[in-house]
Structure formats: C-alpha cells, structure tokens
C-alpha cells in the first residue's frame, strides 16, 4: 500500500536518528494544545515540513545582523519568498485625492516605521546532494554551519544573508554517517530600495512576535494562554493579531489588526461517535458530515481538506517505508510518541493539493480521526443564535477596546527585550503611536420617494421608518398573484397577507386579494405541482410559505420558479410571518419589507437617489463557490439600465471550473447587457462604471493584465461598430471587503461617507477607502476601492461620490450597504445559483431582480 500518513519519511538521505531529532529540536516551534486522547509523556517533535515558526540564531562575531532561520509563513520549500507588486495606477492619473465633503482627522490601526532599513541582503540558492526533501532537515543541516554563514534567513531553498561570501559547497553528515553536500550558488541581492525588502521586514516582525509567547496557527499568531473557552459549545476563541508591513504613500507602515481564531475542541473521532450513536447508517452520515471539512492535526500544526473516508483501513493497517512495512499505530508511537487508542476506527483521506504535487507529494494522505481536530464553523453552529451571541461578546470589539488592544500589542512588543533585539539588530524602529491621517465625510445623500419627496440620510444610514409616511418611488400594483401554503397554516398566512395589503396601501400601492392554493402536505413534490398549477394561471408573483427554514425545500422551489417555470417568487417562513405573541410587535415592519421586496422583484423602485449623470450603466460582478462541488464556481453580472430613466436591470450568471479564465464569460455577459440597454433606450450607454468584486490579491495581476484588457477590447469593438470612434468610456474598479484596515473618529466608528484617499493608500494604485454603512456593534470595516482602468472622464472626487451613491440602492435593505448595490445584487445572484439552483436561471427573468 502506498498511502502515506501525514508527514511520513521516505526520501533517501534522511532517517529518524538522534542527529535529526537534535536538528529538529533547535528552535522547536510552539504547537497547538494537546488533544485529550493523545498520550504524550514528552513533547513530540513536529515534522519538518510542519515547522512554521522562525528560529533566532546567535549573532556571529563577524556579522552585525542577527539571523532568522525559516519562513514564519510556513512556506513550503521552493515557494517564492517575494510577491509581485501589481502596478494598477493609470499613467495619466494626476491626483487620486478628492475635495468634496467635510475635512476631519481619523486614527488608524497603523504604526509607522521610524527608520528605513539601509542594508543589502545577498540571495543564494541552496541544493543538497543527495536530495533532502524534508525542509526541516535541510534547515538543520545548514544550521550546523551558522558560524560560517553569519546572519541569514533560509526557507528551505533560498538563503538570504547579510554578508557576502564565496562559498560553493559545505559538507555535513546524516545520522547514518553519510556525507551530505550543500551546494550554495549566488543568484542576486536585495537592496533596501527593492520591494523584496518588505518580505524580509515581515519575516523579522513575525520573528519578533515569537518572543511574545504567541502561537502560530496557519499564517497568524494567536495568544493560546488568553484563550476564551465556550465549553457548552465545544469551542475556544483564541485572540491574536494580523500584521503586515509595506510601503504606503510616503512611509513604511505596519498594519495591525486584532483577530480571533475559532478553535473547535471536538475531534473527527468525536463526530464519528456521534454518528454511531444517532444514525443507523453511521458510515454514510459520518462521510457526509466530514467530507469537504478542513481538519487540523495538533502534532504537525497543519490543516488538511477531507476528501473521503476509507472504512476498509484502520490504524492497524500497514504502509510501506524504506525501512519496511509499519502500521499507523507503530508509526505514530515511534514518530510522535502518540498512542492511538481505538484500533478499529476508519482512516480519513486527504488528496494532495496542487502545492503538494509541486513539492513532490502525489500520494493520498491518510489521517487518524482520533488525532485530527475539526476546524471552522458548521452551518448548524452558525445557525445557533446562542453560540453566535456568546462569541460576539468577545469578537465584536468596539473602537475604544480595539484601540486599547492595539496599543497593548505595541507596548508588549516594545517591552520585550528579545523582540526589540531582533528589530534593533536590523536597524528597525517602530513608533508607539497609531498613525493619524486626514479624511473627509462626504455630503449625505438625499433619498427620493414617491411624489419626489426627499429624505436627507443621516448618520444612521437607515430610512425604514420613512415608508410610514411616504410612498415608494415607483410601484407595480399586484393584481394577479398566488399564495401557496400548507392547509394547516392557512389562518396564519391569511392574517399576514392582510398585513401586506395594509402596508402596501400605506405606501400608495395596490395589492389585490390573492388566490390561495392550500396544499395537504409540505413535501417537495407537492410544492412543485402547486407551482406548476399556479404558473398556468399567469400570475405576476407567487408567495410560498414554509413551516421552517429548509434548504432542500427552498432549493426545490427556486429551481422550479427560476428555471423550469420562470416566475418571480417570494418565500417566507411561518416563524417569520406568525411569530409568538411576545415577538409579534414588529410584524407590520416585516410585512412592509416583504412588500418592498415584492415590488422590487416586479421592476418597481422602492426609492431612488439624486443622480447627476444620464446614460450611465453601473455593473457589478461577483463570484461564489459551490459548497457542493469545490471545483465549481458561479460568476454573476448585474447591470443597471440607466437609473435616471429606468428601473430595469440586466442579470446573467455562468458556471466555471476552478482556475478557469473569466474574461470570455465576462465579456459575453457585458455584450448581452449592452444589447439589453440598446433595446431599451435605442442607444449604448454614455459611460460604464464597472465594480469587480471577488478578487483576491493573488488574482489582481490577472484582472489587470488579462480581464480588463480583454473586456475593454471587446467593448471598444461594439462601440466603434455603432459609430463611436472614441470607443467605450469605462471605469473598472476592484472592490475588496476582506481587508485589515480600520480607522476611527475620536475612539468611535466613523460616520457613513467617511473616505480616506491618502497616507495609508498605496502609491502603485489609484485607490481609496470608504465607510458607507453604520454598525451598532463592534468596529465598522471600510471597503477598499482600486481603480485599475479609467477613461470615464470623471475626477477622483466624482468617482468617490458616485461610488457612495451606489451603496444606497440595495432594495433588500432600506439603508446603505458595504459595497455598491450592483455588487451586492451580483453576490446575491451568484450565491442563489451556487447554493440552491446549480444551473443557469431562465433568460425570461433577466430584467428583474428575482433573486432578492
């Protein structure tokens, strides 16, 4: 059998002898807490490729710089240490600073580096003969020559050293007494002005954080000693920090963010026992529950994705090594001093990732459930209101508490002698004060209701109450509609429908009495048949009542109404429309929101904003990954048809596989959107404002150099064929929500409309940060906007104002949202298709917001 346990040793030139253990023990990395079912008389040595901490090496006499051994990010051997800086700032841009609004000062979660590094680092490639695959042993062999090398950083292949030398070969011995030749080749140098210096700075910072007794989990450091136990839920919260050093507009800044890691205390073995106790077919139940889950092995501090469960294998099964066959029980006892207690449990299978395959590991990785801890939160955990509430008490930090924790982190770093020695030896000095920067608060937007009545949006960024005295901007009277409800819940449904009719009347909208289809049961087939019968009567919309939230029923209904029998549908649950008496006070508000949503689905406009531009098409694009098939994703595009004169939208969604280029699909859908615009208005849009969501930092290069160029070429062809020789006027903006930047106003959250476009922005980008929403708990997160193409003919100031306006137009919530509404619509559509429909919706619904 060739299946491997985690981190089994097979390559030549390596063994498990005393010498290797001695190497491994030097600078031994901190590990996750020992699980309850692991017997460890002695602290086990983590395997080589699991070492994710750095090791400080004593300064040599002839070296002024201290050395760091290892890549604290846990990089695999051969992984590039240097990341490419994507320059997306348009060359013709003169300034990215806006001028509108009220000028204020805000405090950020950044610290300034007071001294710029002024060193040269020499870069060498290191090879071993015979080949040594285990990164930790490579580090151990090189460590033996630390007195010759001086200060250095070594990630397993690339050596960065502060001193230049002409060494070509070093020789050491393995535990068997065989010679290991270390070949060293000079390949370049890193000057202080190079972008590579920031990778070195981040390595040094992370090394200095090690001295704070923090523990590395994945890529960030957490304080295991300060963990918060939620014993009732088998969950621990570990507080920690995300840090990053990089060049900002004029200074090198350290961004620090307070984060929490959710650590589950139950193992896969616990989940298996639960399945055995509560299900008849425990094998199927266990397999369904764990497949796709990410698990963590405490003995290696590594995570693995579970792809299968092999009930034909158990810990007594054997696999082959160069020293002969060995059972998993023997292997873990010999290698980690771990005693596996249940010898009948199955083994969990993890297929090698692309990164594993590139590193030479192409065999299945076998895990023992008893030794693998479940990670992440399940849907059931997220749906547990009590658990989420208990967690939020610790994770949702208000601005004053967050600022206090950031200052405490800085003080902790500055007061640690070991940490400061690391920084000072490389001539690095960190400021103790958070960076204050200039900002602006954009002027509040005016929300336009029916009869052109206007409401000036205040700092609450919520206009729900205004519907009690105003009609909607435009509405579609509902004269033909069906309500499908279980027979036994007819009375509660009728009461709620009356509330909806009354709420609509207050907003000057007419809703007629519906036709009811009283179904005898709530089986999927019964709902499908009822939908077919209702659609035959040509209704404007169908309301369906579910007894309780049920993903399977919801999916069945949406497939029927979005694909097979295209018709706008509104799904409500009995818990929402008929709550207990003590919670029935807000029922009129719920009815009002349902009516607003139904009106939006029928191409009505609940409200509008003041838009200065005519002929503007606003486009949003987002990607959602399928939870059922990890290799499959759905990209959704939603476009407005000039909001100044039309309430129509265009939407389209396509399936694509992992790693597939999106340029063709995006360009094709934009072609369809322009066709819809031209059919509706008779002309092409004057300008296109394109918001691209769902882009990680690693994808930015592809978006800038491939996606945008391909899209612009295609759009220019369409415009030139229509007689517009100048081509298409478009601004393409990448939207990023998962960022670490935070800013505060007088120890409080900034008000909606607070924009930052200097100091903490990046010199290679045309970017700005914007807070558009108000939050009642915790710290508000700004959204980053990166303009990577712009010939729209608007100044940076007008682009910022236009972006802020677009955050007011999401009809699922009568308030501002974190991103422009078209981005949120695109996310909503992509999520619906990925989670519930799993196929392209009918084109008959493409002009309606049916996915709200």
Image (cartoon, rainbow, N blue to C red):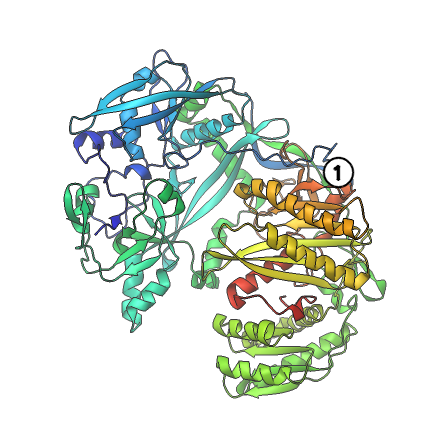
Using residue 508 as the reference point, say whether residue 230 is left or right of it. Answer: left
Q: Neighbour class for label 1 at 10 Å: few (<14), some, many (≥20)? A: many
Residue 844, horizontal then vertical, whole percent: 66, 71
User: 425 above or below 22?
Assistant: above
Q: Quadrant of residue 77?
A: top left
Q: Quadrant of residue 21?
A: top left
Residue in the image at 42% along x and 29% along y = 208
Using residue 512 as the reference point, say whether residue 18 is left or right of it. Answer: left
User: 469 above or below 736?
Assistant: below
The quarter of the picture where the C terminus appears is: bottom right
Using residue 847 as the reference point, say whether residue 363 is left or right of it. Answer: left
- In this view, the residue farthest toward the right is 451
Q: Which residue is mark 1?
A: 98
Q: Is residue 776 visible?
A: no
- In this view, the residue farthest toward the front is 721
Residue 186, horizontal then vertical, whole percent: 40, 20
Q: Secondary structure at mark 1?
A: loop
Residue in the image at 74% along x and 75% along y = 504
Residue 697, horizontal then vertical, whole percent: 54, 41
Q: Is residue 564 visible?
A: yes
């Amino acid at each position: 059998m060739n299946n491997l346990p985690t981190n089994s040793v097979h390559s030549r030139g390596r063994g498990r002898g005393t010498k290797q253990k001695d190497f491994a023990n030097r600078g031994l990395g901190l590990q996750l807490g020992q699980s309850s079912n692991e017997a460890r008389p002695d602290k086990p040595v983590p395997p080589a490729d699991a070492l994710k901490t750095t090791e400080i090496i004593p300064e040599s006499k002839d070296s002024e710089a201290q050395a760091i051994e290892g890549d604290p990010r846990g990089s695999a051997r051969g992984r590039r240490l240097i990341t490419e800086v994507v320059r997306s700032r348009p060359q013709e841009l003169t300034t990215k600073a806006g001028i509108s609004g009220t000028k204020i000062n805000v405090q950020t979660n950044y610290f300034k580096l007071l001294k710029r590094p002024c060193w040269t680092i020499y870069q060498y490639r290191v090879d071993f003969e015979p080949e040594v695959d285990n990164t930790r042993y490579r580090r151990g062999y090189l460590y033996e020559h630390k007195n010759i090398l001086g200060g250095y950083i070594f990630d397993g292949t690339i050596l960065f050293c502060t001193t230049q030398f002409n060494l070509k070969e070093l020789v050491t011995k393995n535990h068997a007494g065989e010679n290991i030749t270390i070949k060293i080749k000079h390949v370049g140098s890193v000057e202080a002005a190079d972008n590579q210096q920031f990778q070195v700075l981040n390595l040094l910072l992370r090394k200095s954080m090690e001295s704070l007794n923090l523990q590395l989990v994945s890529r960030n450091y957490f304080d295991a000693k300060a963990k918060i136990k939620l014993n009732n839920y088998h969950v621990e919260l570990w507080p920690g920090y995300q840090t990053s050093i990089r060049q900002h507009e004029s200074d090198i800044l350290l961004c620090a963010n307070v984060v929490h890691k959710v650590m589950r205390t139950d193992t896969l073995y616990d989940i298996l026992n639960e399945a055995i106790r509560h299900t008849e077919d425990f094998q199927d139940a266990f397999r369904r529950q764990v497949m796709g889950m990410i698990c963590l092995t405490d003995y290696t501090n590594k995570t693995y994705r579970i792809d299968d469960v092999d009930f034909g294998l158990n810990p007594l099964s054997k696999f082959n090594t160069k020293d002969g066959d060995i059972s998993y029980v023997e292997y873990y006892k010999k290698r980690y001093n771990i005693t596996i207690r249940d010898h009948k449990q199955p083994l969990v299978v993890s297929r090698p990732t692309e990164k594993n395959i590139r590193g030479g590991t192409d065999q299945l990785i076998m895990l023992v459930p008893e030794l693998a801890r479940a990670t992440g939160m399940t849907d059931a955990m997220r749906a547990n209101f009590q658990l989420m509430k208990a967690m939020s008490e610790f994770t949702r930090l208000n601005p004053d508490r967050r600022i206090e924790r950031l200052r405490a982190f800085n003080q902790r770093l500055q007061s640690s002698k070991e940490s400061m020695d690391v920084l000072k030896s490389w001539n690095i000095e960190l400021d103790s004060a958070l960076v204050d920067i200039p900002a602006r608060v954009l002027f509040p937007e005016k929300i336009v209701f029916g009869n052109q009545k206007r409401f000036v949006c205040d700092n609450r960024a919520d206009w729900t109450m205004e519907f009690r005295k105003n009609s909607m901007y435009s509405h579609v009277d509902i004269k033909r509609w069906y309500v499908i409800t279980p027979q036994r819940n007819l009375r509660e449904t009728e009461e709620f429908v009356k509330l909806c009719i009354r709420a609509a009347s207050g907003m000057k909208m007419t809703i007629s009495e519906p036709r009811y289809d009283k179904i005898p049961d709530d089986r999927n087939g019964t709902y499908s048949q009822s939908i077919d019968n209702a659609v035959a009567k040509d209704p404007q919309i169908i309301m369906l009542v579910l007894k309780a939230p049920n993903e399977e029923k919801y999916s069945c209904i949406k497939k029927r109404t979005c694909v097979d029998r295209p018709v706008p549908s509104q799904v409500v649950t009995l818990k929402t429309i008929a709550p207990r008496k003590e919670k029935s006070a807000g029922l009129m508000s719920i009815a009002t929101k349902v009516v607003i949503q139904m009106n939006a689905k029928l191409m009505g406009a609940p409200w509008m904003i003041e838009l200065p531009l005519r002929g503007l098409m606003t486009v949003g694009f987002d990607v959602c990954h399928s939870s059922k098939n990890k290799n499959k994703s759905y990209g959704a595009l939603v476009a407005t048809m000039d909001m100044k004169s039309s309430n129509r939208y265009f939407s389209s969604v396509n399936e694509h596989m992992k790693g597939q280029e999106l340029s063709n699909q995006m360009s094709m859908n934009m072609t369809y959107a322009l066709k819809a615009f031209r059919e509706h208005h008779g002309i092409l849009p004057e300008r296109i404002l394109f918001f691209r969501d769902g882009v990680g930092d690693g994808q930015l290069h592809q978006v800038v150099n491939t996606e945008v160029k391909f899209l612009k070429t295609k759009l220019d062809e369409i415009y030139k064929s229509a007689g517009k020789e100048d081509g298409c006027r478009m601004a393409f903006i990448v939207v990023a929500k998962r960022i670490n930047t935070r800013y505060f106003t007088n120890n409080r959250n900034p008000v909606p409309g607070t924009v930052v476009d200097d100091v903490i922005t990046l010199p290679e980008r045309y970017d700005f940060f914007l807070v558009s929403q108000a939050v009642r708990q915790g710290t508000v997160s700004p959204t980053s906007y990166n303009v990577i193409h712009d010939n729209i003919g608007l100044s940076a100031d007008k682009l910022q104002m236009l972006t802020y306006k677009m955050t007011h137009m999401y009809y699922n919530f009568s308030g501002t949202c974190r991103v422009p509404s078209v981005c949120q619509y695109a996310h909503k559509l992509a999520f619906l298709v990925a989670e519930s429909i799993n196929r392209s919706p009918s084109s008959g619904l493409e002009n309606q917001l049916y996915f709200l």
